[in-house]
Each structure stands twice: as C-alpha cells, then as structure tokens.
Image: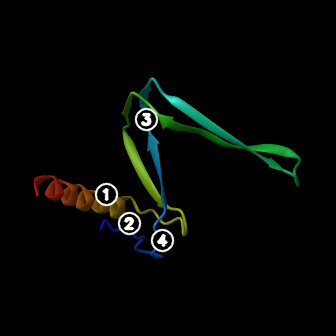
Amino acid sequence: MPKPFSCPQCGGHDYVVVLTGCKVTGATLEEAYTWDGINEEYVSSGSVVVDSDTFDSQGAQAVCSNCETDVTDAVSAYETTVAGEQADAAQA
Ligand SMILES: [Zn+2]
C-alpha cells in the first residue's frame, strides 16, 4: 500500500506545489471565484492549470497545506521513494 507524504513539521499529508518559469502548451486553466460577503467582492483563486499537452518549469517549491513549512526537499525525497516502489512493482 502506498503511504502518503508526511510533513516533517506537523505530520500533515497535503501540500501545494508552486511551479515557476513555466512553458505550457495546449493548457486548460481553471479559476475559481468565491463571493466574499464581508468585503462584498469576488475573491479569485488565480488560474490553475488542470491539464496541458506539455509542461516545463524552471523551478518548483512545495509548501505544507497545514503549517506552511517549505517541504520541497521532503516532497522530492518522498517522490523519489514512491517512484522507486512503482519501478519495483512494475518489475515484479
Ligand atoms: Zn506541515
């Protein structure tokens, strides 16, 4: 069974990855608008790429959704572990 990523700081499993310097082609973007009744205006989530033909980025930073710690190194270590397990499973 695959194990989720765990934040070294708080143990949370959810994280956000921010990609910078992206070159994207054939992309589908999504932007969510939430009504803020206090300020009486719509708040946008910003554009989110939900699908694309190709996706190249110059840099990526991962941040824990729970405690906002920079978990870039921990996520890349996790992804390396998961990729290794999938390769082992494919060979079995
Ligand atoms: Zn955390």
Along the horizontal axis of the image, is 22 left or right of 76? right
Q: Earlier in the sequence, mark 2 or mark 1?
A: 2
Which residue is tagged 4?
12
Relative height, residue 61 to residue 73 (above, below):
above
Rate crowding at label 3 as few (under 14), some (14 to 19) or many (20 or more) other CA atoms within 10 Å: few
Q: Is mark 4 within 8 Å of ligand 1?
A: yes
Q: Earlier in the sequence, mark 4 or mark 1?
A: 4
Residue 21: assigned label: 3
Rate crowding at label 2 as few (under 14), some (14 to 19) or many (20 or more) other CA atoms within 10 Å: some
Is label 4 in a helix, a strand or a loop? loop
Q: CA distance from mark 2 to mark 4?
A: 8 Å
Quadrant in the picture for residue 8 = bottom left
Q: CA distance from mark 2 to mark 1?
A: 10 Å
Q: How many marks?
A: 4
Is label 3 in a helix, a strand or a loop? loop
Q: Earlier in the sequence, mark 3 or mark 4?
A: 4
Which residue is tagged 2?
5
Q: CA distance from mark 3 to mark 4?
A: 28 Å
Q: Residue furthest left?
A: 91
Q: Residue at x 87, y 50 (%)?
A: 39
Q: Is mark 3 within 8 Å of ligand 1?
A: no
Q: Position of residue 20 (x, y in %)?
A: 45, 40
Along the horizontal axis of the image, is 29 left or right of 38? left
Is label 1 in a helix, a strand or a loop? helix
Relative height, residue 29 to residue 90 (above, below):
above
Which residue is tagged 1?
76
Q: Earlier in the sequence, mark 2 or mark 4?
A: 2
Q: Residue at x 45, y 23 (%)?
A: 26
Q: Position of residue 54 (x, y in %)?
A: 37, 29
Amino acid at dot 2: Phe
Mark 2 or 1: in front is: 2
